[in-house]
Image (cartoon, grey):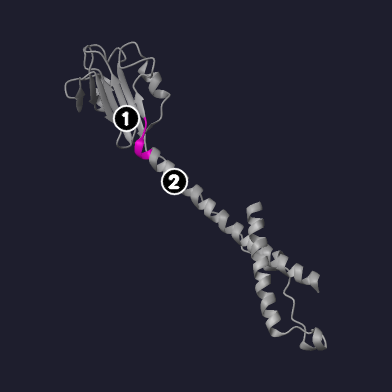
Amino acid sequence: MFSLYILHIFGYSKTLAIFFFSCKMATFRALVSLTIISAALFELAMGATLTVGGSGGGWDQTTDLATWASGQTFTVGDSLVFQYSPLHDVMEVTNADYTACQTSSPLKKYSDGKSTVTLSSPGKRYFICGTTGHCSGGMKLEVNTVSAATATPPSTLPSSPLTPSADAPPKSESPPAADLGHGSSGSSPSQHSSGGHAEIAIGSWLAMMMVLAL
């Protein structure tokens, strides 16, 4: 009888431990998802700052700008930094003017020596130097801006439902009153009540120990 009582308490404790562990795992998965989404949104909002020509070059006639651009991924939100001497400037032009190195009608013109251009939308943009002969000498840049990848939140796996049939021992039916004992050995209702409270207390304590052990 005592062994059955212990097994019943252990089954109750195990069920509680599985429940608490499932709650902890669900909370952990939610926190991980929130962290990933926040990091993606932060990176998207900040964008990257790209120095035209790279660390070893610049906006000049000696840097292979086409090769530099081919090794980059330009994303919406990024910023291009043009650094150049007073001999140069930066002109944003149309595709036709870019191909013909036409400097008479630029869309925008910069001449402050360090110009920042934000790539605010997807599509191609074209830049040339307005100094005579520099564009035809290779001082030109085509930038193909792509949309920032939309952060897709990872699917949160549903918590495994508790299966009392597998995790908890089957419920034992209370024996008839006639089988509880005879004479003075039978348990009174008050004894059953106090035993139930003790069972819950012991079971809760064991469940907490198992959770901490995890």
* Residue 59 place in picture, x, y as percent: 30, 17
Residue 168: give x, y in percent of width and height: 70, 67
Which is more toward the observer, 65 or 199?
Answer: 199
Residue drawn at (77%, 87%) of the image:
177
Whether pointer 1 and pointer 2 mark residues with C-beta atoms closer than 8 Å, the reply is no
Q: Which residue is mark 1?
A: 79
Residue 214 visible, this orientation: no
Q: With 62 as the anchor, is 109 left or right in this view? A: left
Indicate yes or no whether the magenta region holds residue 52. no
Density class for disc 2 (Cα within 10 Å; few <14, some 14-19, many ≥20) is: some
Residue extending farthest to the front is 184
The residue identified by callout 2 is 37
Q: Which mark is residue 214?
A: none
Helix, strand or loop at label 2? It is helix
Magenta region, residue range: 44-48
What's the amino acid at mark 2? Ile
Query: Is 15 or 54 nearer to us in this picture?
Result: 15
Along the line of sight, the residue nearer the viewer: 144 or 34: 34
